[in-house]
Image (cartoon, helix red, strand yellow):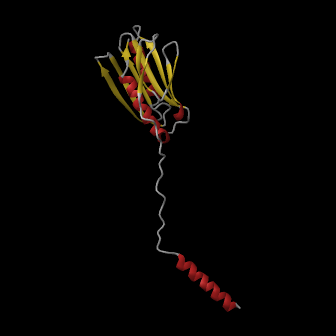
Amino acid sequence: MYTTLRSYLFIVIILITASCGDDELRPKPAAMMALQYPESTYKVIESNNCPFDFEVNSYARVLSKSDCSMKIEYPQMDATVYVDYAPVRNNINELLIDGQKLSIAHNRMADVIDDKIYLNPDKGVYGMFYSIEGDAASNVQFYATDSVKNFVTASLYFDRKPNYDSLYPAVNYIKLDMRQMMESMNWK
């Protein structure tokens, strides 16, 4: 009886060993989320009360306030661009410092802050555009001014904990929209 059990055990071991082929273990390929955003089409946001207008992605929802500030919401991305307006009243230096403070405040959490000067003398629009890489609260900001009467700032925020790797596709999508906002800025 023990010889029969031994022979069965021997056969089972041979079958198990033979079933192990030359197949190598291969790790699964890294998966990336395939986020699809609609192609950007822009429309001009005009307000009779505000001294400026600019183009906004038609995908976004614009909520305006009476003081010319607005929220531009991207509902499917849980993102909002906050636009604030301030009239220039011999306080351009203070407004410029405030416009730059916001990006500097995110310096602690930023890996890189890429700032680009924007000059459009034909339209009288001058400003700075900030791209902030890293787990900062706001990854894209800009300010625009005519240096005489008007000063506009804009900042992108997400309604979730900052995680730049996860937010990267949405940040890039909205960054292009914010650049369009700045480049299409017109003073009335």
Query: In the drawing, does residue 100 fall left or right of residue 161?
Result: left
| Rendering coords of residue 98 (x, y %) | 44, 19
Q: The C terminus appears in which quarter of the rendering?
A: top left
* Percent of width and height locating residue 116: 34, 28
Q: How many marks?
A: 0
Percent coordinates x, y for residue 6 in the rendering: 65, 88
Q: Left of 105 or right of it: where is 187? A: left
> In this picture, is 63 found above or below 91?
below
Relative to 154, residue 159 above or below: below
Is 5 or 74 nearer to us in this picture? 74
Q: In terms of image quadrants, where is residue 111?
A: top left
Q: Quadrant of the N terminus?
A: bottom right
Q: Residue at x 54, y 31 (%)?
A: 75
- In the visual, does 2 lie left or right of 29? right
Residue farthest to the left? 122
Q: Residue furthest top?
A: 89
Q: At x 40% / y 18%, what residue is drawn?
A: 96
| Residue 135, horizontal then vertical, whole percent | 49, 37
Tell me: residue 9, above or below residue 116: below
Q: Residue at x 45, y 12 (%)?
A: 50
Given residues 73 and 167, the one toward you in this image is 73
Extreme right residue here? Answer: 1
